[in-house]
Image: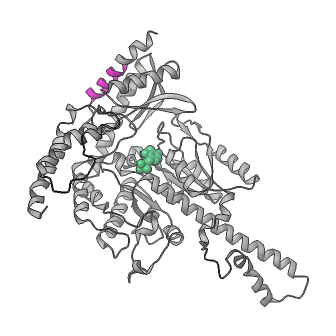
Amino acid sequence: MDAEAFRKYGKEMVDIVADYWDTMRQRQPLPEVKPGYIWDLVPKDPPAEPEPWSRIFADIEPVVFQGTTHWHHPHFFAYYPTACSYPSIMGDILSGGIASIGFTWKSSPAMTELEMVMTDWLAKSIGLPECFLNSDPGPGAGMIQCTASDATLIALLSARARAVSAMEQNGRLNWLYSTISRALPTKFNLREMMKKVEQPSQEKSQSPESQIINFEHHDPVYFTKLVAYCSDQAHSSVDKGIMLAGVRMRKIKSTKDAKFNNYSVEPEVLEAAIREDRAQGYIPFIYVATVGTTNTCGVDSLTKLGPICNREMIWLHVDAAYAGSYALCPEFRYLIEGIEMADSFNFNCHKAMMINFDCSPMWFKDAREAINYFNVDPTYLKHEHQAVASDYRHLQVALGRRFRALKVWFVLRSIGTAKIQEHLKIMVDRAIQFAELIEKDDRFELFVPQHLGLVCFRLKGSDDINERLNTIINDDRRIHLVPAKAHGVYFLRFAVCNSETTEEDVKYAYNVITELAQPLLHF
Ligand SMILES: *Cc1c(COP(=O)(O)O)cnc(C)c1O
C-alpha cells in the first residue's frame, strides 16, 4: 500500500466508520453470532499474496460488524458506558499515523509534554487541587494510564514499596536501638557501633557469589505482614491488582449510607478493621476507595475516610473509573470532595467523557515516590534531559506508551467542556426518567436510588425470578443490560451509555422489560 492508495482507501475507511454510526439504529445492541462463528468466515491460514481492498472491505460487515456488541447503540444499557466521539477517533488516527512510542521525554517530546498539559486541563476541569498539577512546582503529577486496572495496580505497588521502605527503616532503627541499649553499659565505641549498624542490610544482602538481586523497595520478606483494604463493593480489578501485588486483602464491609442510601464504607468500620488487623500483627498499607462502584454507583466518602488514611499512614487511592467524569459538572463535584487527602486518583475518560478507549488519567500527589520505586535505568534509555524532563515510563507497567493525549486535546478543543457537561447531564436525565418509570410500577422496585447514569432495579420477588427476567431480556436482544449482586441480592442494572439515547428509547426499554416480565408474574 503506497501513500496514494492510503489516501483513497483511508478515506473509504472513514466512510465505513461514519456509515456504521449513521446506521446504528438499524442494528440490535447484541449480535446474533454463536461462539466459533469466525471459523466459517475467515480462512485458517494467512494469504501469501496481497488481496484487493475491495475484498477486505467486503468482509468487514459479516466478520466484524455482525459479530460486534454495539456499545454505542441507544438501546445498550449494560456495564458502564464506553465513550466515543468523532474528534476522539481523529486523535487515534493521528496517533496511529505518527506511530511513535513515548516512554521517555526524548523518545517523543510532544507525546510527553502534551500529556502533561492535557492532564492539567483535565485536572482543572474536574476541580482537582493544585497539588496534583504538572504545572504546580510541587511533586504532584498527572499522566495517562491505559485502564483503571493499571492505575490501581501502580497505586498498590507504590504503596507497597512505601510500606516496605518504612519497615526497612524501622528495622534499622530498632536494630540500632537494641544495639545501643546492649552497648551502653560497656564502653561506648562509635566506630564499632557504626559497623554494627550496617549489619542488618549486610545480613539481607547476598554473599558476594550470589547472583540473586534483592530490590530495596520490593523485598518480599516484608509482604507477609501487609494487607490491602478496599470496600466489599470494589471492582474486580482491585482484587486482581492485590493478587498481583502478592499481599493479603481485606474487604471492608459496606453499609447503606445516609447521604445516598447506597453502599459505602463507614469510617468506624474502617477504623475497627485497622485496629483489629494491627492487633494481629498485620500492617494495613493502602485503602482503595471507590467513587462510583460498578455494582450500584455507591460512593466511599473521601472526607470521612481520608483523615483516617492520612493519620494511619495508609496510602489512599481513589478509583473513580466511571463517576470521575461527572465531576466535570459543578453539581456533581461532591463526588471528589476530600480528594486533597488522596495519594493517587484515577478515572476513565473512556467511560463517560466522550473519549474512546483507552484513556485513563491518573494523578499522584507525590510522583517522586513511584518514580523512585520503579526507576530502572538501562543505558539505552538514558538521555541528557533526564533531570528536568518527565519520563512517564516510571509511572506505568509497560515501557511503551502511545499518544493518548491527542484525543484529549482534540475532544476538549473541538467539543469543549460545556458540551461534555451537557452530554453527562443528558445521561443522568435519562436515568432519572427510567427510575421514575420503575418507581411508578408496583411490580418493580429500585434496589438503591438512581445515581448519575445508573438505575439498579428488580422485580419485587425472588432472586430466581429476577435471574429469569435477565435471561429473557438478553435472549430477546432488543435491549442489552447486565445483572449484579450486592450483599447477596440479585438485581438488574440499567446504565445509560449514550447521550443519543432519547426519552423514547428509555420508554422503549421500559416497555420491552415490562412486556418480557409479564409472563413471569403469572406463575
Ligand atoms: C470500569 C471500572 C473499572 C475497570 O476499568 P478498566 O479501565 O477497564 O480497568 C475499575 N473500577 C471501577 C469502579 C469501574 O467502574
**Is the residue 434 above or below the residue 234 in the image?**
above
Q: Residue at x 11, y 64 (%)?
A: 3
Q: Residue at x 23, y 66 (%)?
A: 98
From this viewpoint, is residue 464 visible?
yes
- Furthest residue in direction top, as rendered: 522
Q: From the top left corner, tell me how far across and down residue 169 is, in percent.
A: 68, 72
Q: Quadrant of residue 422?
A: top left
From this viewpoint, is residue 333 visible?
no
Q: From the top left corner, tell me how far across and down residue 9 is, in percent.
A: 12, 54
Q: Is residue 489 left or right of residue 324?
A: right
Q: From the top left corner, tell me how far across and down residue 156 is, in percent.
A: 55, 58
Q: Is residue 275 left or right of residue 247?
A: right
Q: How many numbered circles are shown?
A: 0
Q: Nearer the viewer, residue 511 or 258?
A: 511
Q: How is the image coloured?
A: one colour
Q: From the top left corner, tell me how far across and down residue 79 is, in percent.
A: 40, 38
Q: Residue at x 44, y 72 (%)?
A: 137
The secondary structure that dominates the magenta segment is: helix
Queried whether the magenta region covers residue 510, the answer comes back as: yes
Q: What's the magenta region?
A: 502-513
**Is the residue 388 above or below the residue 434 in the image?**
below
Queried whether the magenta region covers residue 285, the answer comes back as: no
Q: Quadrant of the N terminus?
A: bottom left
Q: Residue at x 40, y 63 (%)?
A: 143
Q: Nearer the viewer, residue 473 or 508?
A: 473
Q: Is residue 142 left or right of residue 206?
A: left
**Is the residue 509 above or below the residue 316 in the image?**
above
